[in-house]
Amino acid sequence: MPLCEDCYAWDLDKNGPFGVVLGKYEDLVTKADNGCESCRFFCSVLQTSDRYKDKLDKLSGQNIVFCNMRLDAREPGVIGMTMSSDDLCLDMCVASDYEGPLTDKFDSLHDIARNSRDDTCVAKISSWMSQCAEHENCHQFESVPLPERIIEVAADPMVAPRIIASGGQKGAYMILSHHHSTDSASSSTEKLSKASLPAKLDISLYPTVIADAIDITRRLGYRYLWIRQLCLTTCEFSAMPAFFLGIYGRASLMLTASVKSEPNVGLFHDRNIVQSPALGIAKDRYLRPRVLRWMTNIEESPLSRQGWNVIERILAPRIVHFTDRQLVWECASGCQFEAAKIIEKQHSGPRMNGYDKKLFQQFVESALLSALTDMSETPYAGKDDSIARLEAWTDSVNALSWGSFENLSDKLLVVGKAALAISDCSMGDYLAGIWSKHVASGLAWGRMFSPLTSTSEYVAPTWSWASVDGPVGIDDVRESLASDSAWVRKYQPEIVSHHILHADPSDPYGNVLPGSHIVLDAACIGFKRLTSALEADDGSFTLRPILDQSLMFECLCCRPRPAELQEAESKKFNREVDHHICAVIRIDDWATNGDSAGPCICLILKASDGDDSYIRVGLEKIGRPKSRV
């Protein structure tokens, strides 16, 4: 491939602490137009990046710098990195025929088909499934009872698919998860749900993704496909969580349309994989986007923002994600990428750590095995896995909190399906999003970025993360992590009693009614009294109040906001603060253990009007600077 003079002479091993200036953006565009494949690569990465694709004018006059394996745009004369988006990070690779060792930071190129319809993509999926069958962590349900309604896919593509009543027969089936919105297909779906079976499926009435899923199902050699929007009846929609656990947990494979840019696109589409020509003195190295080894495309896809799609991902044992750039395989043993051979251990994307399927999937399989066999004979019998269950639950809460719901009444129904898989005696009673034996962890949730908002209609009590819309994170307050567990046992809150009013008394994992509450035994102190006492200690303590629905205590430089909003929120808080208390969730022995002691975390509560109950407001995190210990 032709290179300009600068790119031809570039020594990739000598980039310096501040990177290498590749040239002004306009100069790179000119050289790309004149045939330099390397400059064309850099321009393509910049022009398609989340940071610049909608504001290319910001690149005008900027120096384009290659620094720390990232592309950066800087004002001439400026030294130092700016914040880059994930898709401006690059990998250093060797040729695909390289026979030497590969590492987490040194992968080889891997060419893929331009369109995901290609036979090589089907072959790759089939290969991944064969590998998964050998995984110790991945249970295989070879022949299972089929869902009551399912799509039958004939081997002959000229035969129309049809929805049939399975009649209790057994087999293997696939599932489709895709972005679903109210559109012209909704009326067709409603009519189909009421039709007598079997019923031919006129795929021309439905989104392209349906036809694509049917095609993939046939080409992989499967006869049955289940799609929630087509196969779920009104009665089944409100069914007990075990019903959904069985459908998703026993599926052979789930296909997901995880295209970030166009939520309504099908599984088959063109992929734009860019890579540089051979560079370096020996012309034996290549650059390509590092996101090919990350889960970013999945974490940022529209499916990760839809609550129903999130629970589908949590429950399904094996998934192939059809993303913008490539196919991505996900199972309990890890992930594999179509365009990369070595998985980078660092995760990226808005959730930082993303969703880790291996944490949760073991409990889905455990729940299914216990339903199918004598629990005493399963591999999980007698195993003390309470910590693993809590970690898996915390991970699923993080993922589910990103999901939105067109019908808020679905929120706890969806969460309950994950709760059923986790539930056992070590977790205690399930209480609308938290567990009675892990109440401290259940209450230690907080906003991750922007302020949370109360759900527009009642979903859960304010102490439950399900009562708000927006992503949450949960602090790890386990006793085992404290430097002095005696302090935790002494001050950690305990549930005295719980009074959960279930909309359906027969379903403890379903919706709850207003008036649901818990009674806590906790160490409490007035918010103003606590703050005054700690501030009077001459700076030994650091206080960080984190309000669920306000940025009032956040730095104005880091989190800029209108002065009018800041003033209004401050006035509101100051009017009510006399009625605020702090309830200890986690505390440690600072005096004895110094630097090894963790922060103190308190729940900020506000007295409600008219009774003696309290409403959650946020968290207070208290720490001590190391220099003062």
Image: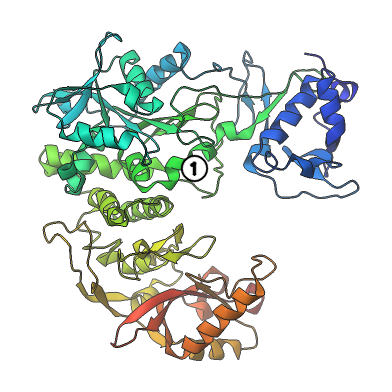
Residue 609 x, y percent position in the rendering: 34, 86
| 388, above or below 567, in the image | above
Residue 134: in sight, yes or no? no
- The quadrant the N terminus occupies is top right
Residue sitting at 46 percent across and 30 percent down? 265
Tell me the SS state at disc 1: helix
Corner quadrant of residue 512: bottom left
Query: Horizontal placement of 273 versus 485: left or right?
Result: right
Of 384 and 372, which appears nearest the observer? Answer: 372
| 491, above or below 360, in the image | below
Residue sitting at 65 percent across and 88 percent down? 538
| 193, above or below 277, in the image | below
Corner quadrant of residue 282: top right
Query: Horizontal placement of 184 versus 78: left or right?
Result: left
Query: Horizontal placement of 248 versus 148: left or right?
Result: right
How many numbered callouts? 1
Residue 92 x, y percent position in the rendering: 69, 29
Q: How is the image coloured?
A: rainbow
Residue 428 x, y percent position in the rendering: 22, 62
Residue 354: in sight, yes or no? yes
Corner quadrant of residue 227: top left
